[in-house]
Image (spheres, helix red, strand yellow):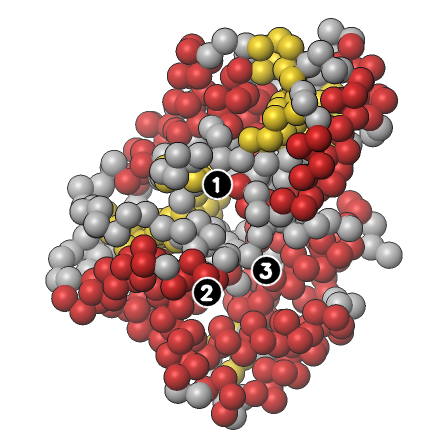
Amino acid sequence: MVSNSTILEQFVEIESKSNLWNHEINGIHLWPIIRTDTFVFAYNKTKGYCTAHANTNKTNFVKPRFLMNALKAQLFFIVNKNDYDCLFTTTKRYLSESGNYHNYFYEPYMSLFSKPLIFESSFQGQTQQPWEKEEKYLFDFIILSSALKAVIKLQLKQSKYKKEISEFASLVCRSFLIPDYYPQLNEILNRRFHSIKYMKSYINKICNRLDGKIAFIHCASYISFHGHGEIIKSLRENGITTIELQHGYVGKEHPAYNYATGGAQSIAKKYLPDYYLTFGQYWNKQIQTPSKVITVGNPSFNSSRDFHEKNCTVDLNSILIISQGTVTPKMVKIATYLSKVFPERLIIFKLHPGEVPFRERYEELNQFENIVIKTYDDIYELIASTKIIVGYNSTTLFEAMAYSNKRIFVLHNNLIPDSIGYKFSACEELRNAILNPKLGYSTADSSYFWEPDWESRISEFLGGL
């Protein structure tokens, strides 16, 4: 059994010993196509974690709004002749209860450019209003259209590489002791491999429009997902500088941000962004990547925190529980326990947007009158409005530490520094800790995690490109 503290290190060692980076067909390396998927599946199985994010509801792909956005993207490649000074591939940060999307995370960066081109991923198949006039297009179109072309050309069924792809998928599953994952992994690898040449064609057309030669790619280091590795490789071949913004938790056990040193890293570097911009100095030391890691901060967090701390009233009688898809059952157990031992308190159960569709995991909470389930609500406002925050290893715990006088309680794990708050192993221990008014306060320096001077940092970075 792999020890909890060295799971990812041993996975990286396995990929090196099995020479997975060296397998290629027609110049396309196979391992980058499925690396993140494989690591996540094997890691979750080893740790006993649940699936973190719900799959996209495919019925959304045939809804009028999605189809209109897809048409808008298709027309971009056919009739749009404009030039742009920067490319952003983004995702909807969250979907509010009112049905309105917010892209607050990227807006400070987009404002630095006069004419950015934006390709935005849907949120679980749900999209913006197609008639919005801004230069924003559906990123899903590139992925789905590329896959559809491969199907139409019958390349998935009649491929002369079918045997090689199957043998590699089998090798991967044997190496990581996940034989039950083979059917799914083989299908993923086959589909993505044959989609690559069509996807690269779209990326090349985008590159021809980029006068600025700069691209911000969301989740670029997740090289398997949405073909990000091949997108980065294509952008680099077109002379485009690629940048990824830190969007959440990263650490030594995060598969997307930890790579082997030596020869394998020289191959990995082709599929990873040139730069990875972090929230603060702390995060730089938690990862091992061939990308150049630079601290710039998180402007959207800084402004949201400052606004809500000024305008929100703290409810001393509430407890905010931060859930996340990998450990939903554990957080539900904590919520039900606290509901019973503190019946006079309001228990706020905040779901991660990716786990909202997994209703069966948390539906029992509806039985408790003092538990309120929150889905797409503004997390920064929730933090500002509560005194006590409970979680596992969510980025929200690091964010809460940067607020004034918050009490933070962490279900014990090695992914969160002890300085963030008070760590507990059992519900009874948490109850006693909450009753002790001296416990839970962070001793960490928030500026080490959250660089406050974003303007100077980003200006210096962009000026050096």
> How many discs mark residues in the rendered view?
3
The label on residue 247 is 1
Return the x and y of residue 293 as percentages of the image width and height.
Answer: 48, 43
Q: Residue at x 68, y 66 (%)?
A: 15
The label on residue 286 is none
- Mark nearer the N terminus (2 vs 3): 3
Displayed quadrant of residue 200:
bottom left
Q: Is residue 443 above or below residue 217?
A: above
Return the x and y of residue 378 as percentages of the image width and height.
Answer: 47, 28
Q: Residue at x 76, y 15 (%)?
A: 342
Disc 1 is placed on an element classified as loop
330 relative to 79 in the view: left or right: right
> The residue under label 2 is which amino acid type?
Gly
Quarter that holds the N terminus: bottom right
Residue beneath label 3, please? 36
Q: Is residue 36 above or below residue 314?
A: below
Residue beneath label 2, please? 227
Say few, some or many: other residues with alpha carbon within 10 Å of mark 3 (under 14 / 14 to 19 / 20 or more). many
Q: Residue at x 70, y 50 (%)?
A: 50
Answer whether labels 2 and 1 touch (C-beta < 8 Å).
no
Disc 2 is placed on an element classified as helix
